[in-house]
Image (cartoon, rainbow, N blue to C red):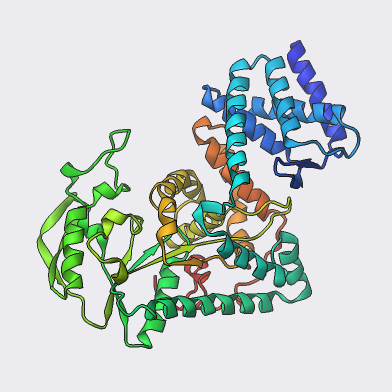
Amino acid sequence: MDEQQKGASQLNLFSIGEQNKITHVIKRDGRLVAFDKKKIANAIFQAAVSVGGNNRDLADSLADQVAAMMYHTYPHRATPTVQEVQDLIEKVLIENGHARTSKAFILHRIEQQRVASQREQHIVAEDNIPYKVLWKVFAWNVDHECETVEKLNRHMERGTWGQLILDAERLYHEEIQKVAAAILDRPKTRLIIVAGPSSSGKTTTTTKISEKLKEKNLSFVLMNLDNYFRNLEEHPKDEYGDYDFETPQALDLKLINDHLAQLMEGKTIQMPIYNFKTGLREEKTESFRLEKNQILLIDSLHGLYEEMTKSVPADNKFKFYIEAMCQLKDAKGEFVRWADLRLLRRMVRDNWHRSYDPVRTVGHWHYVRRSEMRYIVPFIHTVDYVFNGALPFEIPYHKKYMFKYFDKILATFRNDPKKWDAFMRAQRVHDVLEPLNTPATDDDVPKNSLLREFIGGSSYSY
């Protein structure tokens, strides 16, 4: 063992012995959050990967050194700032001969400071969601004592879990009634655009809205935009030379607009039929017409993209956006990320419905999220209604089905530098789930609950 390894080993032993000295750090915005050494290791590994590194064990060892230096530098129960911790990370990287990694870390740190500075100047809600919508969701959770992991556990322990579910389901269905009323208040509406990221609850929510409209003798008719893909030889390609099915230019936007205009005028169109096996449109077409008591429904990743429906006048369109606006704080006091909740939903559904290994779902999630950020989030400000598709009681059920897979998921991605994002995402979700209690059965979840879209047992067919 060389001197550097000996030093690292000694520091590691020191950190183990002193790990209770620092329990919290102060973030740049003044919030107090739990100290987590894994975040230091992840930051070091991310910087290392950006300059060609791939040694996760080394990142962990360097994080041990940073933690040990913190315990040695600060008095018992001190609370350093995040900036002070970052200073120590830079020091450890330089002293261990990792200059390139240190430079990458510094550049990332500067960018984080720039983004944080902009955030301080404006009230910004996650993914373009209006702040007042977000605050309404959080306030309901506080009023019903379900805004933290600890309080969710308390509901299960004191026997009020079933009542929490009933209250949350009532709120969800009241919101369904409101969006249906908003649609009916606009009698010129002939096209409804439903948009939302993966696993946000679009299918169940759209079905429930349609049930309300049927009470007024109105019905949805789905226009399947998959039939409007261009022939493969005309298809755009991504930066790797692969056919890119996720860009709006993969669709025949001109034909879509021509057909939409005709449908709005009450005409019959000949809808193409796309064959995904051949990558070509079939010669035959399908007659399609919109009756007077029908509203055309578009459920597409690109529904909010203006060029998609520009032939339809604005007063004939109703744009509806759904997001799983989870307002739950984890055991460390941090809000659970919405995308992490949706990942859990997708993992559960893929596992029972498609027999997908949850490892595969986590590994692919980066591509799903990238498409959402490109083609949905920038256009949210144009919608007529923002709907919360998160249920405050659902995460314990996801733990019940998925937590057993996380050791395998973490082991799969831990030492893969190309999948560091998957590892950090899995680690983050694991840490959210770990302290949660789980319900013994699913019996308290109604058969018509949105949650059943993901855990199974729904009264609806998907």
Image quarter hosting the C terminus: bottom left
Q: Is residue 189 left or right of residue 79?
A: left
Residue occupying the point 76% across, 45% down: 34
Foreground residue among 409 and 255: 255
Q: Going by the picture, which residue comes out furthest to the left? A: 283
Q: Is residue 276 above or below residue 178?
A: above
Residue occupying the point 50% across, 54% down: 128
Residue 197, can we see it? no
Residue 369, can we see it? yes
**x%, y% of residue 263?**
18, 71
Residue occupying the point 31% across, 70% down: 315
Q: Is residue 1 above or below residue 74?
A: above
Foreground residue among 441 and 398: 398
**x%, y% of residue 403?**
62, 54
Q: Is residue 434 left or right of residue 124?
A: right
Image quarter hosting the N terminus: top right
**x%, y% of residue 89?**
71, 26
Q: Going by the picture, which residue comes out furthest to the right? A: 76
Quadrant hosting residue 91: top right
Q: Is residue 175 above or below residue 275?
A: below
Foreground residue among 219 and 411: 219
Q: Is residue 217 left or right of residue 50?
A: left
**x%, y% of residue 18?**
87, 34
Q: Going by the picture, which residue comes out furthest to the front? A: 121
How many numbered marks are there?
0
Quadrant hosting residue 439: bottom right
Residue occupying the point 26% across, 83% down: 293
